[in-house]
Image: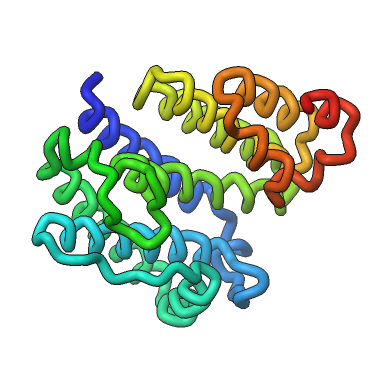
Amino acid sequence: MERKACLLALLKQANEMEMNFVDALPDRERALVGVLEDWSAKDVISHITARKALMADGLLAVAEARTPIGGADLDQENAILFVEYHDKSWGEVLELAAATLRRVVEHVERLDKPALASRARFFPWQGERPLWRLIVGSGCIHPVGHIAEFYGRRGEQAQAGQALGEMTSSLMGLDDGAVWQGEVKYNLACQYALLGATAEAVRELRESLALNPELADWARQDPDLDAIRGEPEYQALF
């Protein structure tokens, strides 16, 4: 499948996973009011929507040859977004989520192959990554990661693993190069480590380093892997 078509399919898949997550929430979870240090389910969907909205704004700026506005301090930015969305009702949040997805899809549909592959500095946190990597990060990897984290906090490891596995399988289709394949598996390893799934985290990390050995230096210091750093299986990788 062409990369843009694959991106659009992934955006739709991630959104379906978000809505399935919302639909399955018990009334008790829907009614909870979160705080910045402990998000409710509505806060999670609000945050996902807010980050997608920032991406949509950035993509519009790219289309208009403007410099996207955005700070590099994600924690500060996330705190501001939390306050902005916190008092919105579920209905308002879901309406914003649907409208934001439409904006993102419209902008992605207008991008040609050179634009998707461009490594120009569109966003402060882009580094050397091409634009398509930012789209899949904010539009797919980021939302599913938060949903899996929420499942994990409730002790629903099976649901978390299923969400991560489904998205990872789809992400592989974006690029068959070893660098991307390794990074996808590395991200999955981090998610498993954060969930406390040690065996799965080590397995995915092992496979990711075999595909992309350049990840090894970061893996030694990545805080997302702190939970497994003392494991003999982790240490054996290095």
The residue sitting at 14% across, 42% down in the picture is 111
Locate residue 100: give its quadrant: bottom left
231 relative position to 29: left or right: right
Please name whichever residue, 120 or 101, is drawn nearer the observer in this view of the structure: 120
Q: Position of residue 209 (x, y in %)?
A: 63, 24
50 relative position to 103: left or right: right
Quadrant of the frame with the C terminus: top right
Q: Position of residue 157 (x, y in %)?
A: 71, 38
**Above/below status of 149 relative to 2:** below
Q: How many marks?
A: 0
The residue sitting at 45% across, 68% down in the picture is 72
Q: Position of residue 198 (x, y in %)?
A: 79, 33
Q: Position of residue 63 (x, y in %)?
A: 12, 55
Residue 35 appears in view: yes
25 relative position to 92: left or right: right
The residue sitting at 78% across, 47% down in the picture is 226
Residue 15 appears in view: no
Q: How is this picture coloured?
A: rainbow
**Above/below status of 58 relative to 129:** below
**Above/below status of 198 relative to 55:** above
41 relative position to 3: left or right: right
The residue sitting at 62% across, 64% down in the picture is 28
**Above/below status of 175 relative to 119:** above
Quadrant of the frame with the N terminus: top left
